[in-house]
Image (cartoon, grey):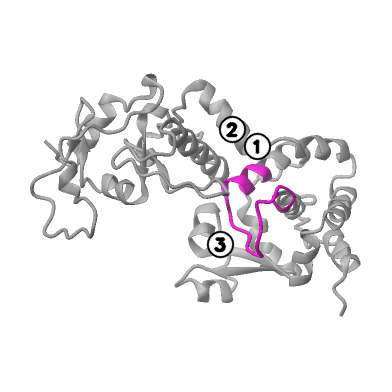
Amino acid sequence: MIKDLGYYSKKFAKLGVDRAHGVAPHKPTLLLSVIEQFEKGRIQHNQIYLTPELIATFLKYWSNLVTTDHRSDISLPFFHLTGDKFWYLVANPGFEATIASRTKIKGLAALRNTVKYAYVDDELFEYLQDFSSRVQLVEILIATWFPTKAQQVENLYQVDELESVQLRLFEKGGAVYTTEDIKDQDKTFVRNAAFRRNVVSLYQQNCAFCRLKIVCRNGQDIVDGAHIKPFSEFHDDRFDNGIALCKNHHWAFDRGWFGISDDYRILIPDDRFYEETPSNMRSLEDFDGEEILLPNQKIYNPRIDSLQWHRSFWKIA
């Protein structure tokens, strides 16, 4: 069988969608979102990850194009597109049997835990890298699944949804969410990514603990936007409940290996470490008493009550 552009045009027009309660638009919405990632250069290899950008784009198209009562959930098409025989999943280590058995995976958290990334036919990957082929595939998706929405799709393409979420969050200095607010895993994942990126930008991509700064050409950096009081318990995405920390010191902070005093000095507990042998670098204990790096806007300095909660939880004097 020749897998040319006509072949994939027919595939995109005849996606296997659930029709029990009207046509479920999850698969065409995901494919529009994936094509936008190719268009914007975010996918360079045949590996499609569940990134904040992809999920934010999916939510953008869903909220503007979908008129049915179906619930938005990117995990559904990301998993079930395998049935259309051009989309495949690579399992995270230890979950190969789960993927091979086609056990149904429900929800974004479970899917990200199980699946490393998706990939498509080599032939389709080549077409997705070509502008004119992408245009044709988008036109097929719109004509088949969203026939009255062509102009809206064109307008939506101009919107970087994750950036928009970041800007809205930044204007408010962050947010505190209710239990109801966080029921939607997709939206919570995007909001969390926006929080973390805003916090990192306030520290100019530096680790507040060790000042490390490494930024890749594609914009990725080694520093995380960490919550001081955990989001899972407090749902607090205000920026003063955040601190920028490199991967090592984020991990250490989340396990109480150090605390931060009310005057923003590093506190290293005396009894936490059995052995530490740094090679050509400072040991953790060497930082005891040093002042952390603070954000470039004072109003976003780590909140004292959050720091006190962290010290109390981990019993750091």
Residue at the spot of label 3: 105
Q: Residue at x 19, y 30 (%)?
A: 261
Q: Nearer the viewer, mark 3 or mark 1?
A: 1
Q: Of callouts 3 and 2, which one flags the residue occurring earlier in the amino acid sequence?
A: 3
Q: Which of marks 3 and 2 is in front?
A: 2
Graded by Cα atoms within 10 Å as few (under 14), some (14 to 19) or many (20 or more), the crowding at tag 3 reads some
Q: Quadrant of the C terminus?
A: top left
Q: What kind of element bears circle 1? A: helix
Q: Does the magenta stretch include residue 66?
A: no
Q: How far apart are marks 3 and 2 (CA)?
A: 27 Å
Q: Quadrant of the N terminus?
A: bottom right
Residue at the spot of label 1: 161
Residue 297 appears at what percent x and percent y?
Answer: 41, 22
Q: What kind of element bears circle 3? A: loop
Q: Which residue is drawn at 40% across and 25% down?
A: 296
Residue at the spot of label 2: 165
Q: In this view, does 9 lie to the left or right of 75?
A: right
Q: Distance between the residues labelled 3 and 1?
A: 26 Å
Q: In this view, does 145 lie to the left or right of 295?
A: right
Q: What kind of element bears circle 2? A: helix
Q: In this view, does 114 lie to the left or right of 134?
A: left
Classify 303 as above or below 101: above
Q: Which sits in the foreground, 91 or 207?
A: 207
Residue type of the residue flagged with mark 2: Val
Bounds of the magenta segment? 37-57
Q: Which residue is drawn at 14% across and 40% down?
A: 315
Residue type of the residue flagged with mark 1: Glu
Residue at the outermost top position = 299
